[in-house]
Each structure stands twice: as C-alpha cells, then as structure tokens.
Image: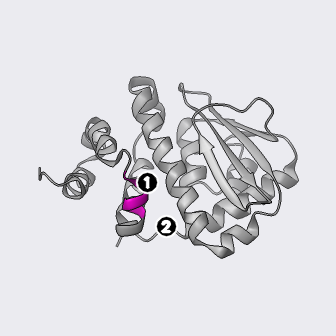
Amino acid sequence: MTTDPIGKIEAALELSDDELAEKLPDVLDELEGQTEQLMLEQPALFARVTQRMDAIDVGTLANEQPETVEQFQALLWTGMELLVRASPDVQSSITDDISVNFQADDAPMTGHLELDGSSQTITGGTDLLAEPDLSITGPADELVGIITGSTDPIQGFMQQRYQLEGPIQKGTQLAGTMGQLTALLPDDD
C-alpha cells in the first residue's frame, strides 16, 4: 500500500468485497475529517467508496463492526450535505420539512435524515429523532441502498423490501429528492 491517503483508499477499493470489509475501518479512518476536501477534489473517489458499500454485506458488518458502519454513515451524511449545497436543482426540490428515522432490523444500525424546506438543506446522523415524520425499517443493506441510490425508494417500498411508517406523500417527496441527489454522484469510470 502507498503512504498517501488517496492512494490507500484507491488500493483498498481494488480489493475483493471480503478484503474491503476487513480494510474498511482503515479506509474510513483515512477519510475522517477530510470528506469535504475529498468531495471537492476527488468526487469520483467518494462515489466509488459509497458504491462499494453496496457490494458489502452491511448487516454483517454492522453486527461485527458497528463503529465502522457509524463512520460510513457519517461519511455519507457529510457527502450528501455537500452535494445538496452544490446543486440548486436538488435544493429547489426540498420544499418541505421532512424528518426520517432509519432502523435496521437485522443489525445494530440506526440513523436519521432531515430535510429543511426553509434552508433547502439535508442533514443526517447516526442517532434516532424523537418524533420523525417517517420511520423506515428494514435490512441494513436496503437502508444503505436507499441513501446510495442502489435501492429505488418507491420500488423498494412497493416490493416490501422495507417498511415505511408515516405519510406516503412525504415518502414520495423524500424519494424524489434522494433520487436527484444520488444521480449527482459521479460514475465509477
């Protein structure tokens, strides 16, 4: 492995899924506190990190390394916040306040997401909100997929891959914003 952080991350992303799962704590440690810089300077690398998480069994990883999954969620939330700031189209899609709790039913993984209609921002974290508008429960892989774009929120709900509690209208608005947001991630080419 190389000594520069970007080189270490790129090398880790070339590993098999099992090897990457083992090296993920080191990769995320390299990114700690550098997400904004990474997004600005290496958006394709950020996209590759998030896309590779879709290939990993997040439920197993969360059971074995809950701290690593929390680090990954922090990376995702920071990256998503930055994408919103950089996209007037996504900002304009955030017209209402929507708060969402995510809770895996197969692993110790929780999180929340808040859309603020007045400031047109998105924030998130690994804790649960006291009174969310929506609660989404399902396998950890599906929950991460909703955020990274590999799981279509509407199709996932219709196929009962996860459960949604709360107003369907807010869920539809959330799905539209998340779809725009994940479309901004650069391709892995």
Q: Is disc 1 placed on a helix, strand or loop?
A: helix
Q: Tell me what residue is drawn at x 79 percent, y 49 percent.
A: 98
| Residue 60 seen | no
Helix, strand or loop for the magenta stretch, by majority: helix
Task: Tell me the kind of residue under disc 2.
Answer: Leu
Task: Tell me the kind of residue under disc 1.
Answer: Thr
Q: Is residue 169 above or below residue 91?
A: above
Give percent across and percent down for residue 81: 57, 57
* Relative horizontal placement of residue 144, taking residue 92 as reference (left or right): left
Instruction: Residue under label 2, please give it.
Output: 185
Give percent across and percent down for residue 10: 24, 57
Q: Tell me what residue is drawn at x 64 percent, y 68 percent.
A: 180
In this orientation, which residue lies closer to the viewer: 121 or 25? 121
Give percent across and percent down for residue 162: 68, 40
Q: Tell me what residue is drawn at x 72 percent, y 43 percent.
A: 160
Q: Quadrant of residue 122?
A: bottom right
Which part of the image, by quadrant, shows the C terminus?
A: bottom left
| Residue 65 seen | yes
Q: Quadrant of residue 125?
A: top right
How far separated are the C-alphas under marks 2 and 1? 9 Å
Instruction: Residue under label 1, please give it.
Output: 50
Magenta span of residues: 34-39
Q: Earlier in the sequence, mark 2 or mark 1?
A: 1
Q: Are marks 2 and 1 in contact (CB under 8 Å)?
A: yes
Q: Is residue 163 above or below residue 96?
A: above
Q: Is disc 2 placed on a helix, strand or loop?
A: loop
Give percent across and percent down for residue 23: 25, 39
How many C-alpha atoms fall within 10 Å of the one at disc 2: few (<14), some, or many (≥20)? many
* Relative horizontal placement of residue 98, taking residue 9 as reference (left or right): right
